[in-house]
Image (cartoon, rainbow, N blue to C red):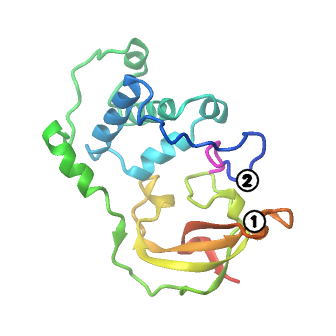
Amino acid sequence: MNGAQDLGGMHGFGPIAPDAGEPLFHAPWERRAFGLTLAMGATGTWTLDESRHARESLPPAEYLASTYYEIWTRGLERLLLANGLVTAEEIAQGRALAPPARLARVLTAQAVPAALAKGAPTERPASAPAGFAVGDRVRTKVINPAGHTRLPRYARGKVGEIALHHGAHVFPDTHAHKRGEAPQHLYTVRFSGTELWGADADPALTVSIDAWESYLDHA
């Protein structure tokens, strides 16, 4: 969906100025929000793509007015509500009003290092040959899906070149909505800045995105 997170090429937000000394967390509650999100993700109640979609589908005004970990917290609240693990009243009161639900898995403190080291690999066996090869020129499709997608707006309908082929990976557009993993070949596609933003763009600029096969046509 064309949510407020998809800001590539938008004007009015000012330059990005990374702070080399920026702490991982600006306040203790941010560390807790991060830990809660990871712990609940490890229960298997929802997928990484569902979690990402919960954050990216927040109402634009709410998304843009929130800090990074406020967005994480609001996304987690939506998932907890949608899966019947809390009630709106419990969130409002900040405490449990009923016994906790049983979960398929529980991430213990001792298991955290191994779980983080393992990650959540998304590569899967390919069910069909790759449709593109490194060096192929491709055109991204023009889509405006109501649901989840990883194809950014600024790169739709543009011509680029396949730079890398990563094998087949879980397709987030279906996985975010409990419609299965539907793995597809995944590519890094490289675009020129002028292709994305016109003749006024820096001619030396290139931009790469990771794009699933169904996002692409031969150019």
Residue farthest to the front? 21
The C terminus, quarter of image? bottom right
- Left or right: residue 100 versus residue 184 is left
- Viewer-proximal residue among 93 and 137: 137
Q: Residue at x 62, y 42 (%)?
A: 17
Within 10 angstroms of label 2, few (less than 14), some, or many (20 or more) residues? Answer: few
Q: Quadrant of residue 19?
A: top right
Residue 156 falls inside the magenta stretch: no
Gap between marks 1 and 2 measured at Cα? 9 Å
Residue 9, disc = 2
Q: Is residue 160 above or below residue 48?
A: below
Q: Main secondary structure of the magenta part?
A: loop
Which mark is first along the chain, 2 or 1?
A: 2
Q: Are marks 1 and 2 in contact (CB under 8 Å)?
A: yes
Q: Residue at x 41, y 36 (%)?
A: 24
Residue 189 in the image: x percent, y percent?
59, 73
Q: Quadrant of residue 25?
A: top left
- Viewer-proximal residue among 22 and 43: 22
- Left or right: residue 202 versus residue 143 is right
Question: What span is in magenta?
Answer: 1-6
Secondary structure beneath dot 2 equals loop
Residue farthest to the left? 110
Residue 196, disc = 1
- Left or right: residue 65 versus residue 92 is right
